[in-house]
Image (spheres, coloured by chain):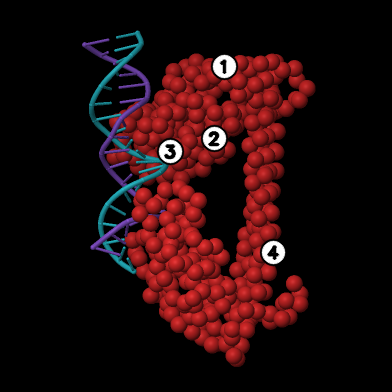
Chain colours: A red, B purple, C cyan
DNA sequence: ATCCAGCGGACCTAGGGGCA
DNA sequence: TGCCCCTAGGTCCGCTGGAT
């Protein structure tokens, strides 16, 4: 249980002389929004403030703008400010300007540092308790100071928001570039001057003349039985046979596009693994998710892992020597792979692909040396992009952190606003 | 007749909405 | 405002059909 005294604005001793301390109860009233019914939850063009930001058609009567919306469920404690009229508040509290004894913009900032997102008394589904929120103490500046703080923070945070938006746009562009780069490489190769031919598949278009086209996936794998399988039948590997130690069992949750990341923790005995040898996965094998949203995530089973056993919904390929595992994995994760999977995926209770259909998918493929060249090119390029992306993400986090500390300093009286204004 | 293959749907869990 | 219920998606398993 969160202790209210732990939040930073409440137990402060030193603050400007003409400021007061007050419980939230005496500063603002948290009113309940309407709970929408299922039929009102239809898509529409009226904005809805709820736990998931959906859009509905229902209108909240007599709402005075502007107001603050405080998340009650889901992302509880999340504070939103709106100038709009005619929107809906679903499963959230709101404070409108008519019932707040303070400057609403200032209150919007002051609420953000109260730590409302940590106050929940619901042990089942966490949610903001209104009574507990009311007990939070905040520092109440004079109205004049409230206005100054709001004005200052409005300008500063708007500037930060613009910067963050630019960086997020960059992240989006990098993601698009990454996708485009891979799609281009696995359908056109790296040499723009290579003579081309028709691939026979309209949405692939032309491919380099010397590439194989119209190759069944089945043809890429070794001749032996068991080179192209999915995991054992449900009844051949029972939960009761799973153990904490032994030969690892690989689930689809372990497969991430462009990288294997083991999340599962279960294993089978060596004896059971011998029985299921047909479904063994060795380092260097390609593994592909058979179900998912959408199915088809693929990665290489890494050299660092011991041999394992795949579960039913994981496809495992052992490729012929003239095919490169990493290249095939890049291909399956590319737009080309997504399109192919989309053609054969069946939505029954779950979207999934059948092994038979998967084996018959027809792909295009360069010679082995070119596969290797493309793979190392893509590895270095995507690594560059990924590095840039994570650097940008880090700077977005820093900006958010800066925004938080600025708000905290301003609403707790730690900031000399006139002085800070002079530095803007 | 026997063997092999896999889909349909139950089960489980987490998250979120609805209502008393 | 707390509890109940629904939904979504991953997991698990048994029934059943087709090939040989």
- Quadrant of res A338: top right
Instruction: Give me the disc on residue A251.
Output: 3
Check disc 4: other Cα within 10 Å, few if <14, some if 14-19, many if 20+.
Answer: few
Dot 4: element: helix
Q: CA distance from mark 2 to mark 1?
A: 21 Å
Q: Do callouts 4 and 1 point to residues on the same chain?
A: yes
- Quadrant of res A419: bottom right
State the residue at coordinates (38%, 56%): A36
As displayed, is residue A290 above or below residue A168?
above
Residue at numbered disc 1? A215
Q: Do callouts 4 and 2 point to residues on the same chain?
A: yes
Check disc 2: other Cα within 10 Å, few if <14, some if 14-19, many if 20+.
Answer: many
Camera-near label (1 vs 3) is 1
Regarding residue A204, the answer to whether it shows in the image is yes
Judge from the rendering whether residue A92 lies leftward or rightward of residue C14; answer left or right. Answer: right
Regarding residue A110, the answer to whether it shows in the image is no
Judge from the rendering whether residue B15 lies leftward or rightward of residue A149; answer left or right. Answer: left
Residue at numbered disc 2? A299
């Amino acid at each position: 249980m969160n202790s209210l005294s732990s939040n930073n604005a409440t137990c402060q001793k030193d603050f400007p002389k003409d400021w007061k301390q007050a419980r939230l109860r005496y500063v603002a009233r948290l009113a309940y929004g309407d709970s929408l019914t299922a039929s009102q939850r239809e898509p529409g063009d009226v904005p809805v403030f709820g736990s998931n930001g959906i859009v509905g058609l229902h209108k909240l009567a007599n709402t005075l703008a502007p107001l603050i919306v405080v998340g009650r469920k889901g992302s509880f404690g999340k504070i939103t400010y709106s100038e709009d009229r005619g929107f809906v508040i679903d499963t959230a509290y709101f404070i409108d300007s008519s019932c707040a004894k303070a400057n609403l913009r200032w209150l919007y900032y002051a609420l953000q540092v109260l730590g409302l997102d940590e106050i929940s008394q619901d042990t089942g589904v966490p949610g903001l308790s209104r009574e507990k929120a009311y007990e939070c103490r905040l520092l109440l500046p004079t109205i004049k100071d409230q206005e100054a703080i709001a004005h200052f923070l409005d300008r500063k945070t708007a500037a930060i928001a613009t910067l963050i938006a630019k960086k997020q746009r960059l992240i989006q562009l990098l993601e698009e570039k990454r996708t485009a780069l891979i799609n281009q490489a696995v359908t056109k190769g790296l040499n723009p001057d290579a003579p081309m031919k028709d691939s026979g598949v309209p949405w692939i278009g032309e491919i380099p003349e010397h590439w194989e086209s119209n190759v069944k996936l089945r043809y890429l794998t070794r001749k032996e039985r068991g080179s192209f399988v999915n995991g054992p039948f449900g009844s051949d590997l029972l939960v009761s046979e799973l153990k904490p130690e032994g030969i690892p069992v690989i689930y689809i949750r372990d497969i991430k596009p462009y990288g294997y990341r083991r999340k599962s923790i279960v294993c089978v005995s060596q004896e059971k693994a011998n029985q299921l040898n047909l479904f063994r996965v060795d380092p260097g094998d390609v593994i592909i998710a058979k179900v998912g949203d959408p199915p088809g995530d693929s990665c290489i089973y890494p050299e660092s892992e011991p041999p394992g056993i795949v579960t039913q919904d994981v496809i495992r390929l052992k490729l012929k020597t003239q095919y490169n595992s990493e290249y095939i994995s890049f291909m399956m994760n590319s737009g080309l792979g997504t399109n192919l999977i989309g053609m054969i995926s069946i939505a029954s209770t779950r979207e999934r692909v059948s092994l038979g259909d998967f084996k018959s998918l027809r792909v295009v493929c360069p010679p082995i040396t070119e596969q290797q060249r493309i793979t190392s090119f893509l590895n270095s390029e995507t690594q560059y992009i990924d590095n840039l992306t994570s650097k940008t993400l880090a700077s977005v986090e820093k900006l958010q952190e800066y925004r938080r500390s600025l708000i905290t300093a301003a609403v707790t009286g730690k900031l000399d606003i006139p002085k800070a204004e002079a530095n803007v």
